[in-house]
Image (tube, grey):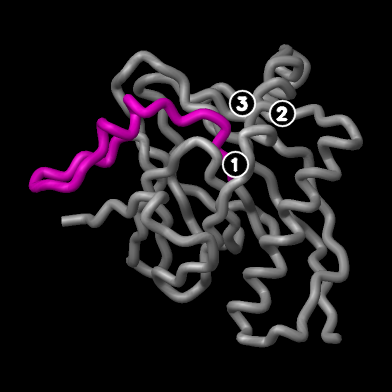
Amino acid sequence: MNRIQLSEDISSGVIFPFGPGIVVDRVSQEVTHMLNNAGIRSKKKANNVKHRLTDSVDSYQLNLNDSEVDIINTIIKYNLLKYIQTSTNNKSLYVDSFTLDHPWINYQQANDFNPSHYHPAAFSYIIYVDIPEIIRSESFEGPPTSMKGVIEFSRNNAQYILKPKTGDFILFPSEIYHTVYPFNNNVTRVSVAGNIHELKIHSK
């Protein structure tokens, strides 16, 4: 039987389910509202990147203004620092610089799914903009176990299953495979994702 981890049961920090760590943190309601509004204005045919990801989930390149990019950069830098210092047990390490690609926003509907995949980057992140509670009620531990609407991380035949909620932030090494399971209710699950490249760190 698979154990489904509730995100609210995790203190903000780095967890180590199978070797490489996964950062679990939270963002403010102001940030989720900002990303939701950015998604609304980005939802145009020219920004459609569904074909680059999976044909199952509607995805759009997220157009952010400079101040919004600064907010995302600050969140990512804080969590990268947390990952690096915790993973190495070295508090003298600091984030020098990194680059981000264009984030994208996902609108997952009933029966949509994101198959197992990894990203060609150093780290990847997900911000959960809107996870309707009715989706969260579809997944539960059994027997039988229902994995609807959860995200599953996998590495070397080990799995870690997380039930996220609105406002959750996750950062992980891009080599980790992950998949998002479908759900049944007629609602929309909204998340923003992106990749981190060219990470440089230094020691104080």
* Residue furthest out toward the left: 143
Magenta-highlighted residues: 126-148
Tag in front: 2 or 1? 2
- CB-based contact (under 8 Å), mark 2 and mark 1: no
The mark lying in front, picked from 3 and 2, is 2
Badge 3 element: strand
Please tell me in which quadrant of the rendered image residue 41 appears: top right
Q: Residues within 10 Å of mark 2 (few under 14, many from 20)?
A: some
Q: Is residue 148 left or right of residue 174?
A: left
Q: Amino acid at mark 1?
A: Ile
Residue named by callout 3:
59
The residue depicted at 52 percent of the width and 57 percent of the height is 24
The residue labelled by disc 2 is 34
Residue 56 at least partly seen: no
Q: Secondary structure at mark 2?
A: helix
Mark 3: few, some, or many residues within 10 Å (few <14, many ≥20)? many
Answer above or below: position of 117 versus 41: below
Q: Residue at x 42, y 40 (%)?
A: 180
Q: Residue at x 83, y 85 (%)?
A: 203
Residue corresponding to mark 1: 127
Question: Which is nearer the eye, 96 or 112?
Answer: 96
Residue 122, placed above or below residue 31: below
Residue 129 is situated, as x and y percent measured from the top left of the image, at 57, 32
Name which residue type carries label 2: Met
Find the distance from the CA under tag 1 to the CA under tag 3: 14 Å
- Quarter occupied by the N terminus: bottom left
Check disc 1: other Cα within 10 Å, few if <14, some if 14-19, many if 20+.
many
Residue 60 in view: yes
Where, quadrant-wise, is the C terminus in this rendering? bottom right
